[in-house]
Image (cartoon, rainbow, N blue to C red):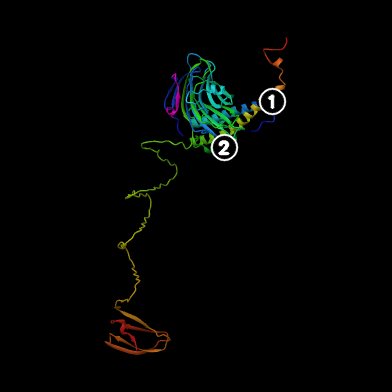
Amino acid sequence: MALENYTTYSEYDASGKVTVGANTLAVAGNNNTAFSVHKVFAAGHFSGDFEHVVAAALNKDSAANLAWCPFWGLSNETAESAHSFKQIKAASGDCLYIAQYEDSDSSIWFRLSEISTGTEYEDYYRSGSYDTWYYCEIERDESTGTYGTLLCRIYSDESRSTLVDTLSVTLHEKEDFRTVYAVSSFYNNSNRPYSQNIKNLDLQEAGTTHTVTGAITLPALEVSGTASKRHVYEATGAVTLPALEVSGEAAKKHIYEVTGAIELPALEVAGQATRFHTWEVTGAVTLPALEVDGQAEIAISLAGGGETDFQVYSSEDEDYVTGMALVDSGLLMAVDWKQRATEAECL
Amino acid sequence: MNYPDTVKTNAEKLAFCYAAQEKLRLAHNVVGTWYRTGVVDSKELATLPTTWQKSLSTASKDGALSETAWKEFKDGAYDVAEKDVIGELGAMKEAVMKDAALVSSVDLDKTLSTATAEK
């Protein structure tokens, strides 16, 4: 939500009754003079429920002149001239507004009004003080009453925690409005001068679009519990990722998607390691010669069993040894191999 | 909104609505002071509706009311209660203003101080 910038509003003030600041208005008003600072939105802009906030103070001047001093309102007037709620009423128009009113030297009123086809319905608070800021919440709640209810909560403090009174007007028609008033005259209600200050109108409209130029500084993110942070980058060209910082333990995984040859890093083992090679090949395979430094066992088996003669080279005898063995369940020989295993053969 | 058994006529109901609104305003300001100062007097706390006492005591931390708890109270509990009363207040205003029986009971000769009646 954002405060309205009064300098963006239309000011119709030929007599110079209003001094306009960004969020403040100083009004040297008179009910015999027409003036208004207002903004015309698209038709039906103020529809359904709404809540506007604004602050106003009526200043004690030389005399209590029974002046009407409007400081908020809605209508459907679009004329490029000063508007007046009194004139809207006289023309049998429609509007909503709130005004301060000088009753006497000792008290001021707040008057909350609906004007429907020229008929006025109002509620008021009669015990306000001069030179005192009052912080108002003006709400339309269309779910209360047949056509809704217009409320004005009047607070005496800026935090809006001390409620002075709540004014209410049961509405007599459902109507959308398009023109909002930061201030308006109550013309023509005779010569009734007054002094008023108005500030910090906030229409509290969600989704208000602000067009800005220059850098935008976002507020720091505050998290009372735990939070996780994710970055999503859309970039062209090289991307440099920030260094990863981990206060506890972390595991790192690399996933590569590559085309072309892959070179694996050298395997480094601090303790023992076992290496397995698996080849998938086509064509002939030449196995390396088997060399055994001690004794080896050779198993011979025949398909279907039976007996077989065999010949084995004996290094001890430095000659071939021949023999015959039953090989129903295979022949197991203990041979002191100094030669190639191929020299043991069945005859 | 519920009326006591003793409140029967529209005029009595209207008066009761104004009284209920004022009681509600005072209760609002007990919580407002609690939010602003960080403390609440136990006697004042006891003047709040029971459901408010429970929810606010649960929401408060170290005795203070956070801004979040305050806004939840205002936008939730208080606004709902206020509109309940104001809705009935508006209905009773209309009912009293258009009370045909009351209108017919008015004798203007006896009512007007600038009497038009013969003396």
Q: CA distance from mark 1 to mark 2?
A: 41 Å
Badge 1 marks a residue whose secondary structure is loop
A72 or A90: which is nearer to us?
Answer: A90
Q: Residue at x 62, y 26 (%)?
A: B18
The quadrant where residue A328 appears: bottom left
* Residue B39 - label: none
Q: Residue furthest top?
A: B119
Residue A26 x/y as whole percent: 44, 22
- Which chain is disc 1 placed on? B
* Residue named by callout 1: B99
Left or right: A287 in relation to A48: left
Q: Earlier in the sequence, mark 1 or mark 2?
A: 2
Badge 2 marks a residue whose secondary structure is helix
Left or right: A246 in relation to B85: left
A91 or A10: which is nearer to us?
Answer: A91
User: Three-letter amino acid code at disc 2?
Assistant: Lys
* Residue named by callout 2: B54
A44 or A312: which is nearer to us?
Answer: A44
Q: Residues within 10 Å of mark 1 (few under 14, many from 20)?
A: few
Q: In what quadrant of the picture does the C terminus of chain A appear? A: bottom left
**Which contiguous range is marked in magenta?**
A5-15
Residue B86 visible: yes
Q: Is residue A226 above or below residue A48?
A: below
- Which chain is disc 2 placed on? B
Residue B115 x/y as whole percent: 69, 12
The quadrant where residue B19 appears: top right
